[in-house]
Amino acid sequence: MRREHDSESDDSGSEIPSGSKKIKYSQKFNKTWLNDPDFKGWLEQWEENSAYCKACKKNISVKTMGKQAQVRHIASERHRTSLKSVKGQQTLASFKKFSNLEKTTKKSEMHIAAFVSEHNLSYNIMNHFVQLLPKICPDSEVARNIKCKPTKCSAIVNKSY
């Protein structure tokens, strides 16, 4: 028996078949996508291989397509309608924040209510006292903003305000 396989001329194992598939690497979430103007505001990282659309409340796998998965998601009808509704909503940060004047006014109202309670004064004096304050301190913005009538004074003292 003769062998047809020669060790020096063995090139059959080194050939790559022409129809072979490309090796696909697993993609990971790239944090630079968060700063991309197309993705800013609605995209956040969910896991290593996925993103989350805050507008649609949907996970987007980036494992096989990477950034192209977000681009495809942007083009979807669901995302466009969700994004329109989210843009019309107020954010929590946009709700009214108390200014320094409002904080100072509230503190002053609490001090006045504590004074009335401490000295066993009638809450009814607050009707006149609130009108008197701006006359005593005409340059004080806080004195002009105090709105502490008997009902509010009682609520502050009883800690229900």
Image (spheres, rainbow, N blue to C red):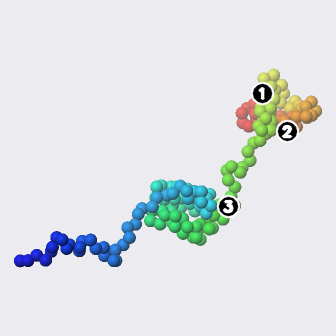
Residue 89 position, x and y percent, is: 68, 58
C-alpha separation, residue under disc 1 versus residue under disc 2: 18 Å
Residue at 50 percent across and 62 percent down: it is 60
**Mark 3 packing: few (<14 Cα in 10 Å), some, or many (20+)?**
few
Q: Is residue 75 left or right of residue 94?
A: left
**Mark 1 packing: few (<14 Cα in 10 Å), some, or many (20+)?**
some
Residue that numbered label 3 is attached to = 87
Q: Residue furthest front?
A: 8
Which kind of residue does numbered mark 2 sit on? Asn
Which mark is on residue 145?
2
Q: Is residue 60 left or right of residue 55?
A: left
- Is residue 30 at least partly visible in the picture? yes
Residue 3 position, x and y percent, is: 10, 75
- Is residue 113 at least partly visible in the picture? no
Residue that numbered label 1 is attached to = 114
Query: What element does badge 3 sit on?
Result: helix
C-alpha separation, residue under disc 3 versus residue under disc 2: 35 Å
C-alpha separation, residue under disc 3 versus residue under disc 1: 45 Å
Q: Nearer the viewer, mark 3 or mark 1?
A: 3
| Nearest the eye: 17 or 96 | 17
Residue at 81 percent across and 26 percent down: it is 116
Query: What element does badge 1 sit on?
Result: helix
Q: Quadrant of the N terminus?
A: bottom left
Residue at 15 percent across and 74 percent down: it is 5
Residue 54 position, x and y percent, is: 58, 58
